[in-house]
Image (cartoon, rainbow, N blue to C red):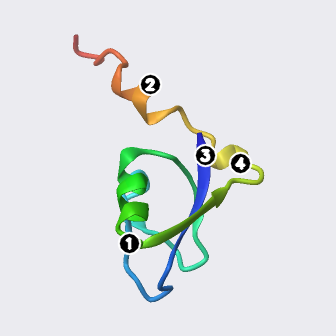
Amino acid sequence: MHKHVAPIDPRSSIPDPERGQFLPPEGRTVWWTPYWAGMLAREEITVSDAQDVPVADEAADPAEVAHETHPDA
């Protein structure tokens, strides 16, 4: 499930672990994971429903990726 998340304080440096960079002040659409739920519980981000997910942001569900077979297996 996708959600739009944004920092409560636009000057915050909130890591986005999926992209390896910080969440921009205007926020972005992300896969809703326990990481983002924790950020919401700590009141570091605001959350809204994602409007339209751009194709570039449409990636496999992180839970599904974690279950893929390793190429060396």
Q: Are marks 3 and 2 in contact (CB under 8 Å)?
A: no
Cα separation between marks 3 and 1? 18 Å
Q: Quadrant of the C terminus?
A: top left
Instruction: Label 4, secondary structure: give it.
Output: loop
- The residue that mark 2 highlights is 64
Q: Earlier in the sequence, mark 2 or mark 1?
A: 1
Horizontal side of 23 relative to 20 (left or right) equals: right
Residue 10 percent across, percent down from the top left: 50, 85
Cα separation between marks 2 and 1? 25 Å
Instruction: Label 3, secondary structure: give it.
Output: strand
Q: Earlier in the sequence, mark 3 or mark 2?
A: 3
Instruction: Label 2, secondary structure: give it.
Output: helix
Q: Quadrant of the N terminus?
A: top right
Residue 69 percent across, percent down from the top left: 32, 15
Pick out the residue farthest to the bottom.
11
Q: Residues within 10 Å of mark 1 (few under 14, many from 20)?
A: some
Checking the image for residue 2, the label placed there is 3
- The residue that mark 1 highlights is 14
**In this rendering, which labeled residue sits more in front, label 3 or label 4?**
3
Q: Earlier in the sequence, mark 3 or mark 1?
A: 3
Q: Earlier in the sequence, mark 4 or mark 2?
A: 4
Cα separation between marks 4 and 1? 21 Å
* Residue 41 position by quadrant: bottom left
**In this rendering, which labeled residue sits more in front, label 3 or label 2?**
3
Q: Residue at x 47, y 85 (%)?
A: 9
- The residue that mark 4 highlights is 53
Cα separation between marks 3 and 2? 15 Å
Q: Residues within 10 Å of mark 3 (few under 14, many from 20)?
A: some
- Which amino acid does the dot numbered 2 rest on? Glu
Q: Residue at x 53, y 32 (%)?
A: 60
Residue 45 percent across, percent down from the top left: 47, 70
